[in-house]
Amino acid sequence: MKQKELDGYQEFVKGIWRENPVFVQVLGMCPMLAVTNSAMNAVVMGVATFFVLVASSFMISSLQHWIPRQVRISLYIVIIATFVTLADYTILATLPAAHKQLGAFIPLIVVNCMILGRQEAFASRFPVKYAVLDAVGMAGGFLFAMLALGSVREILGTGTLFDIPLFGKGFEPWVTMILPPGGFLTLGLILLFFNWVTKKRGEFLQQVATEREGL
Amino acid sequence: MSDNQTKEPGSATLILSMVLAGLISGVAIIGVFEATLPTITLNKAKELREAVFKVLPGVSKMQKLRFANGRLQVVEDNKVGEDVIYAGYDAEGKFIGYAVPSEGPGFQDTISLLYGYLPDQRKMVGMEILDSRETPGLGDKIFKDLEFVANFKDLSVDPTIVAVKKGKKAKPNEIDAITGATISSKAVVRIMNVARERWEKRLPPPGNEPELKL
Amino acid sequence: MDNLIWIFVSALLVNNFVLAYFLGLCPFLGVSGRLETSLRLGMATTFVMVITAICAWFLNTYVLIHAPYLRLISFIVVIASTVQFIEMAIKKLSPALFKALGIYLPLITTNCAILGLAIFATNRGYGFLEGLTFALGAGAGFTLALILMAGIREEIEKTKDVPDLVQGTAMNLIVAGILSMAFMGFAGLFSAG
C-alpha cells in the first residue's frame, strides 16, 4: 500500500476544527444532544468518548496486521464495546451522581458512528502514532463540541455554568434550552454559524485572489 | 491495497481471531467489574439508606422486607419491585415505620419515589423523589420546592391523599399543589395513593411488625 | 393494562425516541427526504425493534442474570446477527417484503435507537409483554417522527425561498427542534386526570 505523506500535527489539528466530527461531519449526534443539557454532563460524556476512541484507535492500529479483513467490523465492535463497558463501570463507581443522569446514554457510545468511522477510515490503515494523534484530535473536537453545546444550553436554560450562577436573581431561565427542543435548535444554529464562517472565508479568499489578478 | 495478493484466510483463522478477541475482552470486562463492584454496591446501599433515613425521622437501622406467601419476610438480595418495602428501627431496635418505594407516570416520564409511613398513626412522615425527568424549573419542584416536600411531613392517609390548590389546604389529608406544576404534584399524590392501597392489606396490624434481624 | 397503555403512549408521543431521546438521528436526518422511503424505513425499524425486545428479554432473563457485565457486548452481537439473519430469512421467504425493507436492514444495525431500546427496557426492568409494548410504541414513534419530518421537507423543497446557507442539516435540525417542541405538548397526557 502506498502511504500518503503524514504530518502528525495536521492529523491532530484537523479533528478540532476543519473536520470537526460534530460541526462539520455531523456524526455522533445521539449522545451529543441527549446529554448536553448541562456543561458537566457534556464533559463526562465527552471524556468517556475520548477514552473509548483513543483506546480503540490505539488497539486497532497496533493489531491492524493481525485482524482478518472479513471479520474486521465485528472485531472493531467487540473492542469498542469492551472499552465502553470499562468506562461505564468506572463512571458508575467513581461518579455515581453523573452516572444517574447520563444513565442509558453511556452504553450508546458503542453506536456513535464517529468511533467506528475513525477505525475503518484511519486507525486500521495508518501507523499507531498517527492513529493515536488522529483519535486525540477527533475526540478533542468532539469534546470541544460537547462542551460548547452544553455550556450554551446550560447558560441559557438555567443561568448557570458548571452549577455556578452567572446572572443575578432577575434572570428568567429559558427552560426550553435544556429540554429536547433546545438541543436541536442550538446545534442547528451552531451549524448555521459554521456554514456562514466557511462561506465568508471562501468569499474572502476569492476576493483576495481576484485582487491579486487585478494587480 | 495488498489484499488481492495475500492469501484468503481460512475459516479457522477467522473463528480463532474472533474467539481470541472475545476471550481478551471478557477477561478485561470481568476484571473491571470485579474491581468496581464493591464500590458500586456500597454507593447504592448508601444512597438507599440515606433516602430511608430521610423519609423516616428518628430511624437509624433498617431492613428490607418482601411480601411473599401472604406475609412480610426479611430478605437481603438486591432485587426491587412492587413487593419490596423497607422497615425502619431506632437505635434500640424498636420498630418506627415503613419506607415504601413506588413509581408511576409523571408529567414527562416515570417518577419513582420513596415515602415514610407510620402504620400506628396512619400518617406519612416524609417523601423523597428518587428519580424523575420532570420539566426543569416547573415539575422538578416536586423535589426542589422544600415547601412542597414539607407537605408530606405530617399527612393523614385517610380516606386518601388529595392535592388541592396552593393555600387551600384545610384537612390533614390534603397537600398544597405547586403553582404551575399541578400535574406533577397530582402525579406524586397518585403514585403514593396507588402504593398505599397496594400495601394497605399486606401490612400486618400495628404492633406485629417483623423484628429487626441482626 | 393501564401500565401497558402508558408504556406505549409514552414511547410513541411523550418520550418519542427521536424527538425527546435523540435516538436514531442518523436515519432521521439522512433518510427523511422522501415520504415513501421514510415509511418503509420506519416499518423495518419497528420490525427489528420488536425482535430485539424479545431477544433482550430472553438474554436478560436467562443469560445475563448470571453475568450482567456482558450485557452491552451480548446486546450488540445479538442485534447485529439478528438483523443479518432476518435479512437472509426475508430474502428467502418473501422477495416482495425484501424489496420493500431489504436495503434498510443493514442500516438499522448501527441505529442507536435499537440498542437504546434494549438498554432502556433493561434499565426499567420491563417484563416480556411490557418490553414488546415498549418496542411497538418506540417503533411507531420513530416512524411517526420520520414521516412528519419527510412531509415537512418535501413541502420546503417546493418553495424556493430557503437561502442556500440554511439548506441541509442546519435547517433539518431547526425543523426537528420545532417538531420536538410540538411534541412537548403531549407531556402530562397520562397524569392530567
Image: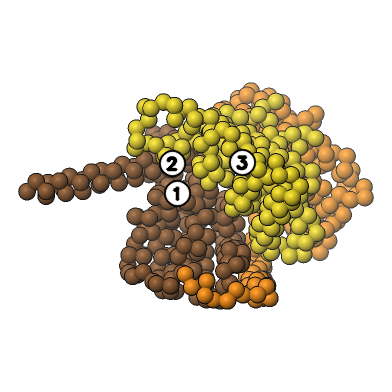
Chain colours: A brown, B orange, C yellow
Please name the residue shown 60% across and 26% down the image: B166
Please name the residue shown 80% across and 29% down the image: B159
Which amino acid, mark 1? Answer: Val
Question: What whole-number distance in Å separates the C-alpha atoms at marks 2 and 3?
Answer: 19 Å
- 10 Å neighbourhood of mark 1: few (<14), some, or many (≥20)? some
Horizontal and vertical percent position of residue C95: 71, 44
Question: What whole-number distance in Å separates the C-alpha atoms at marks 1 and 3?
Answer: 21 Å
Subunit bearing disc 1: A
Tag of residue C41: 3
Residue lying at the far front in this picture: please name it. Answer: B5
Subunit bearing disc 2: C
Q: Nearer the viewer, residue A155 or C54?
A: C54
* Residue designated by label 1: A26
Left or right: residue B81 compared with residue B153 = right
**Vertical side of A108 occupied by C98: above or below:** above
Pointers 1 and 2 in contact (C-beta within 8 Å):
yes
Horizontal and vertical percent position of residue C31: 53, 41
Horizontal and vertical percent position of residue C109: 62, 53
Res. C40 image quadrant: top right
- 10 Å neighbourhood of mark 3: few (<14), some, or many (≥20)? many
Q: Is residue A100 visible?
A: no
Subunit bearing disc 3: C
**SS under mark 1:** loop
Question: What whole-number distance in Å separates the C-alpha atoms at marks 1 and 2?
Answer: 8 Å
Q: Nearer the viewer, residue B175 or C187?
A: C187
* Residue designated by label 2: C169
Tag of residue C183: none
Same-subunit check for callouts 1 and 3: no
Please name the residue shown 39% across and 62% down the image: A137
Horizontal and vertical percent position of residue B204: 89, 45
